Amino acid sequence: MTLTAEVVTSVKEKAKKAKHVSKKLGLLQTEEKNEALLKIAETIEQQSDFILQENQKDLEAGKEKGFSEALMDRLMLNEERIHEFAESLRLVTRLTDPVGEILDEWTLENGLHVKSRRVPLGVIGMIYEARPNVTVDAAGLALKAGNSVILKGGSSAISSNKAIVRVIHEALDQTKIPRDAVQFIEQTDRSSVQAMFHLKEWIDVLIPRGGASLIKTVVEESTIPVLETGTGNCHIFIDQTANVEKAIQIVINAKTNRPAVCNALETLIVHRDWLKENGAALNEALLQHQVTVHGDQDAQSFFSEAVPAEEVDWTDEYLSLDLAVKVVDSIEGAIHHIDQYGTKHSEAIVTEDEKNAQIFLNEVDAAAVYHNASTRFTDGGALGYGAEIGISTQKLHARGPMGLPALTTTKLLLSGDGQIRS
Amino acid sequence: MTLTAEVVTSVKEKAKKAKHVSKKLGLLQTEEKNEALLKIAETIEQQSDFILQENQKDLEAGKEKGFSEALMDRLMLNEERIHEFAESLRLVTRLTDPVGEILDEWTLENGLHVKSRRVPLGVIGMIYEARPNVTVDAAGLALKAGNSVILKGGSSAISSNKAIVRVIHEALDQTKIPRDAVQFIEQTDRSSVQAMFHLKEWIDVLIPRGGASLIKTVVEESTIPVLETGTGNCHIFIDQTANVEKAIQIVINAKTNRPAVCNALETLIVHRDWLKENGAALNEALLQHQVTVHGDQDAQSFFSEAVPAEEVDWTDEYLSLDLAVKVVDSIEGAIHHIDQYGTKHSEAIVTEDEKNAQIFLNEVDAAAVYHNASTRFTDGGALGYGAEIGISTQKLHARGPMGLPALTTTKLLLSGDGQIRS
């Protein structure tokens, strides 16, 4: 696919502007940044009519295109949701500013004093899909950590996003943060995303948020470092000694509390002996919560309405009230299955055997590994980070829920009085 | 370029083996890893005759190909250098093991206990050029941090590297670390490097070390995250109030102490007023140290044997006794030049004006920013990290000299007694 020269030039100009003001932004005081966020929050609430009117255009277009109910719901704004936008910005003002923190400090024998200071990354490129709330959240978190942000939202929310950014710019004009710190790419074609992939000189990191295909494209094509927020093919292993009540309540919570999110349960692995004893109770609970079991051959005999599992049931996220179930004879079998199919997001064991719990916690390779708790806690809000820019399933820079510190880097400051190296 | 199926299969098999044993490696005790490194050190010294004999083949091939004296020197091994290999491994055994460190620990209101623990990355792919010492250093650091390593050295050192890896394997067979933890790619063609770029499932990070072109290829083509160790186009700014002795000794040290390394000075920026006063002394010192000045128009009148600077003098590293010199009228001019041409490695100001020092330290965007000291300290050894796997010029994960912690990631361990999310 060739990029139109016009789009490339336009995206590059935006990246340059974002970079240019990022230096000033990185030097602002916490109070100045907080005041700007509060002003955005206030203006968003004041201008809710305008935002709702523009949102209406996206809803109409979506209806015409025959969007699913779920997608329409993600797209839809109302007074309450706009109030939530403002509240989430107010929450960010209460988070500790990571910028300027001294992470380490020491003096060499020759007297050279070394400090490692947390500084903003610079310019963050955010590539996301339908939800207009990402526009507000990403701008708020990026600015609080002293970064400029380039927003590239999905085409289905284009009018809503444009309206929100217009309001953000209007608000910023009354603050110390220049409006150029928030750039929005209005073009909705694929080439405008691709134009970002090679602007390494002006964009410091790309964060894709959305479906597996979007993330894959960004990871494969971008020469800018990517913070990968991946899919969660999460497992729970019910061990031989698992407490029945804990096991059932954890499985039901992880599967049904919010099936469409990345920390929801997708595959249940059960020890054969536990299942023989407690299969009926588990079956009943799953039926009661309308969960459809896709079982391997052994599992099918324990679950009255199970359908046979195929390879895709082990590999893919359902994001629905479906659950793959595999029967194993040991913890090794469970770990082996997770090694093979897990996406390194969230994995749990339910057991009363402390030794097996430690084996599982030590050996399973994932951002978050649980003992006797629901996988649903892998979330910046639930873990007390205050807010998150996404959940990283990669190992470099940040792993698991990413709060404000993930939007910073470090700089060594070395002060001397003429030190030279011999 | 198409990859031969054979090469792809062979590299993939090695990556799989490395991944397979990395789990065991990640669970070893510090003592077990140290014992293995000491055994490698001992065996390398015992087998020095064999290594030197194989090194001779590389030297003969290099001679035939007409390698430069500098390249031949980098390739050449002798008893002393082999002893240094062993000593560098012994040094690594004395470094603190980062694996298992608890970075953070807290309890949620519902009683769920959360720990953030440092764990190995898994498998590190190391792509490097001539020096055979990287084979030893990379293996030592990777293993100490609990990682498997896949080594892809340059073709000019192929016989030396093969011999060293054979000795490492022989040593590992007497330890708790399986020999599969150190993989070596024997193929010397480009396609064997490219074969690594897409093995995301088995390789967790790629670290290229070498010239700009190698690094560029890896950054642009790899879908595996890269730790970029970049070039250092380092600047020193002599401000109006700089102390003459300090300024001259810092410039001479940063330029001439080891001109071929990445933290050496490449461009000197001087305040016009300081130069008017002290140009003669600086000129004399530079001449005495055989430094060739490439000056902008203003600079040429101050340096008796200056040649005119062209654009390439501002953009490229010399890695020799050449020095670009630019005259400015203010600190803003100096920072502007660094913004434009710096590679975000190491930048310094020499000044007695504390306010300007702070402006420079705050505003210049680089891994290391100095006040009144030589840029030559940007080095894991000099800063007290003990050893380094490279110097990162990127902002994600690790910035500046990378010690053992850069070869690790984190994992959240969550222990509960049935917690579910409401």
Image: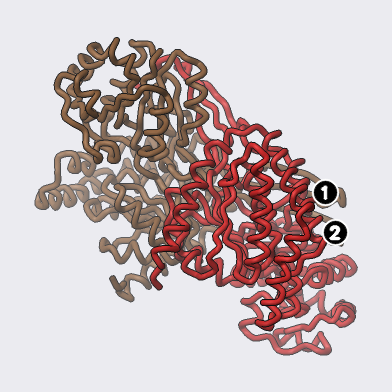
Chain colours: A brown, B red
Identify the residue shown where x is 82% and y is 48%.
A108
- Give the amino acid at mark 1: Leu
**Placement of A41 over or under A263, stated as above or below:** below
Q: Can you give x and y, in whole percent of width and height, for residue B156 in the image?
A: 64, 71
Q: Chain of mark 1?
A: A
- Mark number displayed over residue A181: none
**Placement of A108 over or under A10, stated as above or below:** above
For the residues labelled 1 and 2, say whether their Cβ atoms are less than 8 Å apart: yes
Binning the other alpha carbons within 10 Å of mark 2 as few (below 14), some (14 to 19) or many (20 upward) gives: many
Q: Is residue A28 visible?
A: no
- Give the amino acid at mark 2: Gln
Q: CA distance from mark 1 to mark 2?
A: 10 Å
**Placement of B29 over or under B311, stated as above or below:** above
Identify the residue shown where x is 69% and y is 65%.
B131
* First in sequence: mark 1 vs mark 2: 1
Q: Is residue B296 left or right of residue A132?
A: right
Q: Is residue A54 left or right of residue A345?
A: left
SS of the residue under disc 2: strand
Q: Which residue is mark 2?
A: A419
Q: Nearer the viewer, residue A125 or A294?
A: A294
Q: Chain of mark 2?
A: A
Q: Can you give x and y, in whole percent of width and height, for residue A308 in the image?
A: 18, 31
- Mark number displayed over residue A108: 1
Q: Can you give x and y, in whole percent of width and height, for residue A288 in the image?
A: 18, 17
